[in-house]
Image (spheres, rainbow, N blue to C red):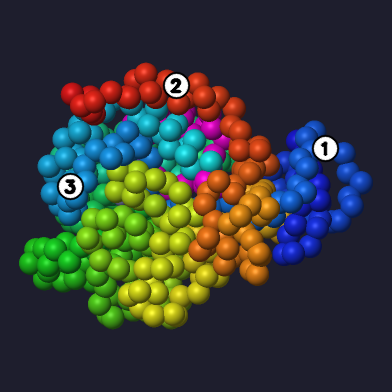
Amino acid sequence: MKTLLIKQARICGRETDVLVENGKIARIEKGMKAKADKTIDGRGKVILPGFYNLHTHAAMTLLRGYAEDMELEDWLTKKIWPAEAKFNEDDIYWGTKLACLEMIKSGTVCFNDMYWHQEAALQAVTETGMRAFIGLTMIDGHPLGFHQDTNEVWEKIKNKQTDKIKFALAPHALYTVAEENLKWAARFAKVNNLLIHFHVSETEKEVDDCQKKYGLRPIEFLDKIGFLGPEVILAHSIWLAEKEIEILVKRKCHLVYNPTSNMKLSSGVMSFSRLKKGGINICLGTDSASSNNNLDMIEEMKLAAVLQKLANGQDIKVKDIFAAATRNGARALRLEGGIVKEGQTADFILIDTERLDFLPGFDLLNDLVFSASSECVDTVVCGGDVLMENREIKGEKELIGEIKKRYGRYPSPRD
Ligand SMILES: [Zn+2]
């Protein structure tokens, strides 16, 4: 049995020890007399749940800073898709590794990804020890993502799922996947018990185009074709009418708020408080390092909070934003995580609260959301495995060296 002991850290303001056995939090108790394979000194640190980043395109770290000052459609069609067409499996492996490094450094334990070359991504994530849902991405006409190929990929990789790494079905969006293929996706997900990860109502134009094509708004259309259910995780979800919100409540879909990407691509602002009032589970995601331009959930929480305050008043509180970044994400992914409690999965982080950004220390969550930088993340534990300790990750220097050697040249990428 693999064991880990954290000594004298604080949980909810009280000093305590935490014993982890076989990936679960076995005991939380002050002054525990337990022996463990590994012991971490938690003095001056606070234990919090790790972050669940519910919408990423991990390997797009390779396109960070590549295309700026554009709106979504031009950005995708003129810059991103042509660049992505040049990526091979090897690129996806390194891009995903770089994303995992960045996510661990900022306290993320799990991410929900949508990209290509699933086996390369699987290998990269496995090596880092993170938890992830890797998307079986579908885009009509795409050489890697047409639905017949999705079936083939699934048959090839379905037995490679592990405790930490699962696959989800990821049809890209309404404007890239036709009606019959969305219906196929909904059936395929049900038969194989897969989550569905989808972009929807990100821009006003997407809604207008859907109305022209199908005579319905996106959520109405998706409901009509039987696509929606509790297994569906919808990124962006900005341009929603009241009747669409009612459908989302009824179908128990999960939504992902992506504030930085939405601001940067001039897409719009999610109506968090309206959705929350309906009881919808709202998670937080960074989207890609090309539209964000980082994968830092602490920064994302601040932007998530201040954007809501500017656009919608003071309905959304710090605790709502923290829940979106942690336990709401775990819930959407059907994981026992996002809470530090006995019996829960040991996905947690140690925060150094002796830093300037936590002084004088009126309220930990207020400081974490509005003041802290991700430099405060000292240690990251995922499923009982220590992924980072004292801000050090095994192999970090070598990975950065390799990335610089392969991609650190201009013009980029790959031209
Ligand atoms: Zn996205």
Residue 404 rendering spot, x and y as whole percentages: 38, 23
Disc 1 marks a residue whose amino acid type is: Ala
Residue 19 rendering spot, x and y as whole percentages: 79, 47
Is 136 above or below relative to 25? above
Q: Is residue 100 left or right of residue 181?
A: right
Q: In 3D space, how far apart are the residues under numbered discs 3 and 1 (Cα atoms)?
A: 51 Å
Give, as a single range, the part of the protein colored magenta: 106-131
Disc 2 marks a residue whose amino acid type is: Gly
Q: Is residue 151 left or right of residue 167?
A: left
Mark 3 crowdedness (10 Å alpha carbons): few <14, some 14-19, many ≥20: some
State the residue at coordinates (47%, 39%).
Answer: 102
**Of discs 3 and 2, which sits in the foreground?**
2
Mark 1 vs 2, N-terminal side = 1
- Pointer 2: what residue? 401
Is 277 above or below relative to 333? below
Residue placed most toward the observer, 291 or 356:
356
Mark 3 vs 1, N-terminal side = 1
- Pointer 3: what residue? 75
Q: In 3D space, how far apart are the residues under numbered discs 1 and 2 (Cα atoms)?
A: 34 Å
Residue 396 rendering spot, x and y as whole percentages: 53, 28
- Pointer 1: what residue? 36
State the residue at coordinates (66%, 50%).
Answer: 352
